[in-house]
Image: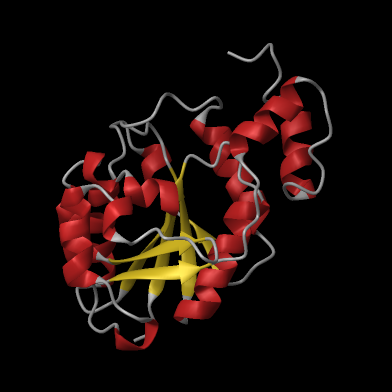
Amino acid sequence: MQPIGVFGGTFDPIHFGHLRLAEEMAEELGLARVVFIPAGQPPHRGTPHTAAIHRLEMVRRATAGNPLFSVDAREVESPRPSYTVDTLAGLRAELGFEQPLWLLLGADAFLALPTWHEWRRLFDLAHIAVAARPGARLLQSDAMPERLNNEVSQRQRTKGSVSGPAGSVLLQQMTPLDISATAIRDILARHGSARYLLPDAVLDYIHEHQLYTHHEH
């Protein structure tokens, strides 16, 4: 059964760094598809700068041309704060417990994992693939919180040795695209050009709705 990737985030806004990560993960892990899940109300971060409905639409526009990519609105449509563990549990219930799932995380998100709600349950629900820059020392024990290191030491695998529907941790080297949503918001706030940092369809949507200007609330 071909695995499915799950890629959550605020996507505020979505940019080429996100899209390239998903594309490379799909290729390296042999994913049938990557499901983008924009966060509704992320509990462990500040309120996103832009309303969830706009962030959802930007993700839809950014992913529209790629048959490997799909978008799931469940967190945006939920009235409650969105916890990754609940989202994965919902996907598991729909897809069955034999379906291999990969939660795709950037390095910073992975290192903060012990602050997440019921974080150890994540390993029961999915494998975790961590995107790292070439040469990063990310999964060495002195780079991680101790609780996370204990899990990783038991679960880290190489690509060819992953089996089952969940439970492994894999460090996957990625093309380093040093693009951040924060930097894009700063450029747009000062009316600079963000072209070639994110898809034109997303940039057009941002301009159409005047997102990320100083006047937004």
Residue at position x 78%, y 20% in the image: 190
Left or right position of 125 against 21: left
Residue at position x 73%, y 37% in the image: 205
Which residue, as the protein is rendered here, is positioned at the far front? 142
Q: Where does the image place residue 2, in percent across and percent down from the top left?
A: 39, 83
Q: In which quarter of the view is residue 98 placed?
A: bottom left
Nearest the eye: 12 or 55: 12
Q: Where does the image place residue 51, in percent across and percent down from the top left?
A: 53, 27
Residue at position x 29%, y 82% in the image: 162
Nearest the eye: 53 or 135: 135
Vertical relation: 122 (above or below) 80: below
Left or right position of 82 against 17: left
Q: Where does the image place residue 73, in percent across and percent down from the top left?
A: 44, 47
Left or right position of 202 against 82: right
Is residue 153 at least partly visible in the picture?
Answer: yes
Q: Quadrant of the N terminus?
A: bottom left
Q: How is the image coloured?
A: secondary structure
Vertical relation: 14 (above or below) 189: below
Residue at position x 56%, y 27% in the image: 50
Is residue 167 at least partly visible in the picture?
Answer: no
Looking at the rendered structure, the number of numbered marks drawn on it comes to 0
Left or right position of 85 against 52: left
Nearest the eye: 130 or 19: 130
Q: Where does the image place residue 129, in percent across and percent down from the top left?
A: 38, 66
Vertical relation: 149 (above or below) 190: below
Nearest the eye: 129 or 91: 129
Q: Quadrant of the C terminus?
A: top right
Vertical relation: 181 (above or below) 128: above
